[in-house]
């Protein structure tokens, strides 16, 4: 059942090239420019004319929502708000029938997300679900939706569901940008090819496993970790930190790299591993400056970089080189070594990786 792997989590990490491809199968065909999400067809009008997109979710699914905020704003120029379901539902939020609400949930059973949906529905918004479990409560409570098709996720730490969520949301953003005319035909066609090329790149990134395991062995006894990224990699930093916390019980924090100097920088000393996601994108130079700031304070630098990077390699204690991709789709690749890092550290610390203490796969109580 674990397909030869020691844990479901590792099996699910390794399934990602296939699960992302499964998620796009029959929906995206870059050559012909075809992009279809069955669940969205009847609601395309509402989606296209929405004044605002509100994304609501919890935990890792909320991180996928943050990536989507960047995608929707960049490609479709629509204002987006990403809300923790638990805060949204109790805040008497301003919602109208012109809002398009996207609820993201692997299990489809998260109590707070379900309650947020009911609230937004009462206020007349259109609710779209991005769920993994077919026929789940959230899938049923929404007006329409697109399944992530990642297959059953058994490990409590969400991995393949996260990348499948981002895949669906990326397709939605490209579709919306094209329909609203904020993406030109040629840009749209290029982005479709870029997205279609992701599974093969994830396959390549998975080969870094040995290297990541060696890094894990060196820092498995650290008491704290900091994860930093900017732009599309900011949510990846949050996700990397959450993965480490939940399965290895090491305290970790994710931050947008620029926020470091507003507080977290005080934590940095020679004992503090700092994981930077520093791929070649529009914020690369800024991230390099942040790496310099950590280095000046003797922090240990572990950097996820783009293959062939020379600048960061000279500064970092360890680099993990991932294949280049369009920056909007880099999270699908850059999160993979962070999943592996948390996995190996947890195994080395003797933790129950698939069933971490105090956590459940579906949080059906608020
Ligand atoms: C993280 C994790 C949790 C879930 C959260 C939402 O690895 O498992 O943070 O992401 O409880 O769950 P779903 O997506 O099922 O609504």
Image (cartoon, grey):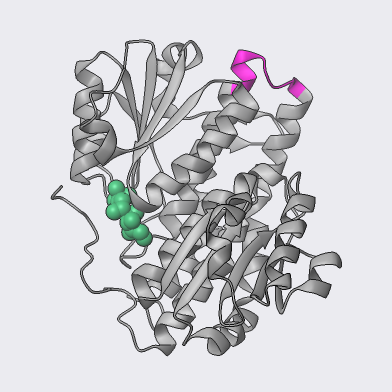
Q: In the rendered image, is residue 356 in sight?
A: yes
Vertical position of residue 333 compared to residue 247: above or below? above
> Ligand 1 is in which quadrant of the figure?
bottom left
Q: Residue sitting at 41 percent across and 54 percent down?
A: 161
| In this picture, residue 350 sits left or right of residue 70 | left
Does 310 sit left or right of 294 as displayed? right
Magenta span contains residue 182: yes
Residue 192 x, y percent position in the rendering: 67, 36
Taking the image as shown, residue 173 lies to the left or right of residue 59, namely right
Q: How many marks?
A: 0
Residue 260 x, y percent position in the rendering: 59, 56
Quick one: 70 or 362, which is closer to the camera?
70
Going 50% across and 52% down the picture, which residue do you hit?
Answer: 163
Residue 6, how many percent across, how many down?
39, 84
Residue 120 versus residue 167: which sits nearer the camera? 120
Residue at 15 percent of width and 50 percent of height: 364
Q: Residue at x 79, y 67 (%)?
A: 312
For the magenta stretch, what is the residue range? 177-185
Compared to residue 36, the image places residue 25 above or below, namely below
Judge from the rendering whether residue 129 lies leftward or rightward of residue 323; answer left or right: left
């Amino acid at each position: 059942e674990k397909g030869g792997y020691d844990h479901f989590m590792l099996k699910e990490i390794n399934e990602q090239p296939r699960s992302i491809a499964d998620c796009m199968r029959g929906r995206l065909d870059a050559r012909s420019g075809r992009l279809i999400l069955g669940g969205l067809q009847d609601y395309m009008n509402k989606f296209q004319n929405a004044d605002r997109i509100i994304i609501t979710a919890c935990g890792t699914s909320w991180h996928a929502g943050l990536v989507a905020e960047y995608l929707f704003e960049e490609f479709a120029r629509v204002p987006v708000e990403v809300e923790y379901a638990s805060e949204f539902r109790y805040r008497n939020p301003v919602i109208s029938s012109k809002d398009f609400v996207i609820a993201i949930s692997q299990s489809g059973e998260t109590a707070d997300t379900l309650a947020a949906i009911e609230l937004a529905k009462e206020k007349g918004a259109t609710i779209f679900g991005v769920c993994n479990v077919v026929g789940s409560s959230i899938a049923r409570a929404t007006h329409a939706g697109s399944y992530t098709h990642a297959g059953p996720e058994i490990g409590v730490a969400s991995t393949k569901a996260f990348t499948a969520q981002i895949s669906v949301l990326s397709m939605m953003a490209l579709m919306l940008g094209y329909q609203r005319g904020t993406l030109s035909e040629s840009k749209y066609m290029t982005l479709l090819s870029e997205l279609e090329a992701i599974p093969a790149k994830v396959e390549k990134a998975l080969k870094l496993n040995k290297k990541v395991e060696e890094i894990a062995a060196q820092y498995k006894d650290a008491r704290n970790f900091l994860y930093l990224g900017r732009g599309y990699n900011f949510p990846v930093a949050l996700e990397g930190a959450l993965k480490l916390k939940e399965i290895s019980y090491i305290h970790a924090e994710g931050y947008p790299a620029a926020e470091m100097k507003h507080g977290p920088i005080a934590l940095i000393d020679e004992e503090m591993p700092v994981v930077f996601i520093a791929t070649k994108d529009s914020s690369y130079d800024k991230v390099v400056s942040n790496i310099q700031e950590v280095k000046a304070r003797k922090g240990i630098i572990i950097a996820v970089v783009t293959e062939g990077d020379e600048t960061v390699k000279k500064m970092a204690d360890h680099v993990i080189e991932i294949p280049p991709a369009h920056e909007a789709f880099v999270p699908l690749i850059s999160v993979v070594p962070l999943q592996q890092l948390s996995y190996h550290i947890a195994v080395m610390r003797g933790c129950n990786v698939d069933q971490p203490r105090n956590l459940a796969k579906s949080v059906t109580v608020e």
